Image: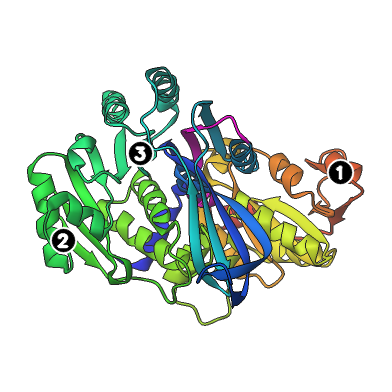
Amino acid sequence: MHYQSLIGLLDGFHAARVLVLGDVMLDRFVYGSVERISPEAPIPVVNVDRFSDMPGGAANVARNIADLGSKVILLGVVGADTPGEDLRALLAASPTISARLTTDASRPTTVKTRYVANGQQVMRADRECRDPLSAEVAQRLLDALAGALGEADLLVLSDYAKGVLSDAVTRAAIGAARGRGKRIIVDPKSKDFTKYRGASLITPNRLELQQACGEACESHEQVTAGARGILERGICEALVVTRGKEGISVVGADGTDAYLPAAARQIFDVSGAGDTVVATLALGLIAGGNLIDAAALANVAAGIAVGKRGTATVTTGEIIGMLTPTDGRGDLSKIFSLDSVQRLVRGWREQGLKIAFTNGCFDLLHPGHISLLDQARGTADRLVVGLNSDFSISRLKGPGRPVQGEVARAIVLAAVKSVDAVVIFGEDTPLQLIDVLEPDVLVKGADYTLDTVVGADLVVKRGGKVVLAELLPGHSTSDTLKRAATP
């Protein structure tokens, strides 16, 4: 598929709503160095420098969806313990994740602790309970599912074999979703795929498919044969099989048969790459792509994820950057989700840099826009631009706007030298963005007054300032559209 069509699918990500149900966990990374072997046993001694916690399992699927700019509801089970509280806090920091976690005091929160020394993982220690949920906890979880299905376009079941997605819960969840007309994507862990009967799509890795079909699944042809066996049993409608460095195979009951070579440029860490695939697949399908289109996007996203360390996520800007031929003059990696731009701004602040913020529709970029952006960048060390989504512009300006889609507008803004980051927002105003990013300077055009600038009070209260940029006479989007419409 042509790269422009794939990029076009990204336009629909910001309107997508995904429901994720599965095994949530805390991924803990302990970093250090190894300089000697223990005298007590032939094992390395890790001198610990620091540790980092991240949402893992089904929670990492949710985090991937959020970082791709979409809204997600997360359902899962945690223990009444400190790791559970830590996981809730991590998820609460993401404004586009609605974590509706059920507490089960009888089981611990799943924690995977990875020890990384000198850039290499030397050990992993797991704290978990694999027993199925009690009937009472399972029912509470299913009640939460029933209440959330109406808010979502698609259901993802993220099975890590930690007891949440028992046979009974899985059957009930698939039945409930199908009853509401929702598509279901399953990231499997069970060796018996009949557990997932009724799913729209199953996304095993090569080994998981091999265990399920009982045959070798090395080549694309072998994978296709194994997948056809699953499809012939009526378990699901299609399979997307991840094969590591060999890429992805797509097989559907409708005769779909495609092989997508791996998109990775370099591999640092495969932790959570499958979660990235599932998240991107879900959003690609919701955005209107067919299975191969969505799998192609997922393949690109996975290639980006494995080039990062830790349980990584991917942004639409990074996907655009991988897909788009460039001569080096633009910087498409400037396009961020809300979650990822928060981390970016936090890093800038740690360097002592001041942050400016401005926002707008930027539908047809003209000299007036460039002047505003240059003036805004001149007030601080970095400039973040909030870009209205297509839906918010339609609400504000009517069904004929925008002229250009949000991804196209973001790409153009990212090519402007004075812009350091672009983040698309779906609300009618950028108030949430301003509240979260806490810019040092808020910039709007001089056609506003201090009293009419959204978020001005927040910025001033925090010690920042509001700047009204001079307007460049004779340039506005409305005038440009009028001139274009004049015969």
Mark 3 residue crowding within 10 angstroms, few (<14) / some (14–19) / many (20+):
many
Mark 1 residue crowding within 10 angstroms, few (<14) / some (14–19) / many (20+):
few
Confirm whether the magenta stretch covers residue 325.
no
Q: Does 306 sit above or below residue 291? A: below
Image position, residue 191 (x, y; %): 22, 46
Q: Is residue 126 left or right of residue 81?
A: left
Alpha-carbon span between mark 3 and mark 2: 22 Å
Image position, residue 410 (x, y; %): 57, 59
Nearest the viewer among 153 and 26 is: 26
Instruction: Work out whether residue 475 can be spotted.
Output: no
Specify the quadrant of the image occupied by residue 94. Answer: top right
First along the sequence among labels 1 and 3: 3
Count of marks placed on residues? 3
Residue 449: mark? 1
Q: Does 477 sit above or below residue 82? A: below
Mark 2 residue crowding within 10 angstroms, few (<14) / some (14–19) / many (20+):
many
Task: Check disc 3 and give the amino acid type.
Answer: Leu
The secondary structure type at the circle numbered 1 is loop
Taking the view exactly as shown, the residue that stands out farthest to the bottom is: 327
| Disc 3 target residue | 157
Task: Check disc 2 and give the amino acid type.
Answer: Val
Q: Residue at x 60, y 37 (%)?
A: 88
The secondary structure type at the circle numbered 2 is helix
| Disc 2 target residue | 223
1 or 3: mark nearer the eye: 3
Image position, residue 429 (x, y; %): 68, 40
Task: Check disc 1 and give the amino acid type.
Answer: Thr
The secondary structure type at the circle numbered 3 is strand
First along the sequence among labels 3 and 2: 3
2 or 1: mark nearer the eye: 2
Taking the view exactly as shown, the residue that stands out farthest to the front is: 40
- The segment highlighted magenta reads 64-81
